[in-house]
Amino acid sequence: MYTLKFDIEKCHNCQTQACLTRCQHLDIDREVAQREIRKIARGEDSFILHDCLTCYACEEYCTMGNHPFYLIVEQQEALNIPPVPRPLIQRAVNLGVPFRGEPEIGEVHGPVLNMAAFSDLIGLIQGRLFEGLTVISTDDRKMFHYFCQLMYLHYARSSVIKERLPGVINTINRHKPTEVICFHDECYGTYTSYCPAVGIDVPFTPIHFFEFLHRRLTELKEAIRPVGFKVAYQRPCSSRLSPDKHHFVRDIFELIGARYVEREYVDENALCCAGAIQGQRREGSRKRAIEMQRKNINDMKKAGAEVCIFNCPACFQTLGSLLSAEDIKPMYMSDLCRLAIGEKPMEWR
């Protein structure tokens, strides 16, 4: 079994305990944070394990590279502390199992784009940005063979990830890719953060979707016409696993002439979509989720955003209608990029 590389000595030597003191959902001082993270590392119970909202942010806040969120998830499972109701956990685990036969494997010997579990969103990768690019996971009956499985962090089921992920990686690698462009940054975070943290080998080169889009826009720079929209960005929880790629959000907006509004809840201070909070179904969780969503959307309105840009389909599904009701158009980044080079995505025709 793969083992999390967590070093409790790093926590002893940490001067900030930023992983917990910076948490946006728990009010914890440094002394309490130091005590509780050490308890968790020793395999003991802690209120953190019961109150964690699984927003991933502590992975980014940790200054020691010591994977506090992965540790929390593993201890929730070890101590049988489910963050969501057990029937929802079982339903989710059943959903993501690879089945319905093996996918057809064609050797590419070049770059591929992995849609993972979002083959129904194939319409988002049309046009010149994606010309000549081989797409894998286009069959929605077999897409879970390409699904990174990392969403089970929200369900305290690291064991499921470790059991299934090596097979997923093997399936992708059978295509003989030179690089794998990850449609969802949770997949990218899986291969560049989670896999090294637990010792799973990744035999291909993962590429963040926004890095790919920026590369292609640069190649098509002569075709770009400034879009001019005032835009906000809904940063997903999985982006916390690849903070070194987050700069591509601003880089893309600058390249295509989108006006990135300045607001409070951005970058490291970003609020999640609160979908995971709704799913926890604890006393007060629905109210808490609504309050967080309202705070987030009001922040966008106050900043004058006309469009909210998404990468994560789950965030889009959670916030899209709420934004539309406030006259802020929800839109995927790839569609915005297509508009910038003179193409009209289906929803804009």
Image (cartoon, grey):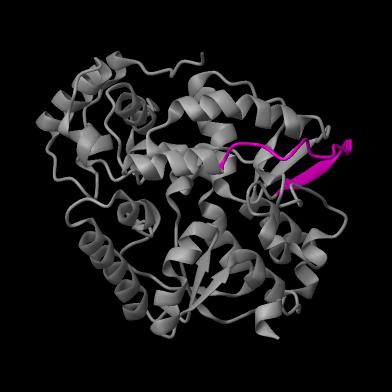
Q: Which residue is drawn at the image coordinates 40% and 55% (left, top)?
A: 267
Tell which of 219 and 284 is nearer to you: 284
Vertical side of 172 occupied by 4: above or below: above
At a point 49% along the width and 21% down the height, the residue shown is 198
In-image side of 210 versus 134 (left or right) = left
Q: Percent position (x, y) of residue 156?
A: 37, 34
- Asked whether residue 241 appears in the rendered view, the answer is no
- The answer to which quarter of the image holds residue 66 is top left
| Residue 232 visible, this angle | yes
Q: Quadrant of residue 7?
A: top left
Which of the two residues, 263 or 145, is positioned nearer the viewer here?
145
Q: Is residue 108 magenta?
A: yes
In the image, residue 95 lies at what x, y percent?
A: 54, 44
| Count of numbered labels shown in the rendering | 0
Say above or below: 310 vs 323.
above
Residue 291 relative to residue 171: left or right = left
Query: Main SS type for the magenta part?
Result: loop
In the foreground, 225 or 196: 196
Q: Left or right: 169 with respect to 22?
A: right
Q: Is 89 on the left or on the right of 288, as rendered? A: right
Question: Image point 28% across, 36% down: which residue?
Answer: 19
The structure residue drawn at horizontal position 37% and vertical position 42%, both measured from the top left corner, is: 87
Quarter in which the C terminus is drawn: bottom right
315 w.r.t. 226: above or below: above
Magenta stretch bounds: 96-114
Closer to us: 120 or 23 = 120
Residue 135, x across and y down, in percent: 79, 50
Q: Name the quadrant containing residue 154.
A: top left
* Residue 59 covered by magenta stretch: no
Q: Position of residue 11 (x, y in %)?
A: 26, 21
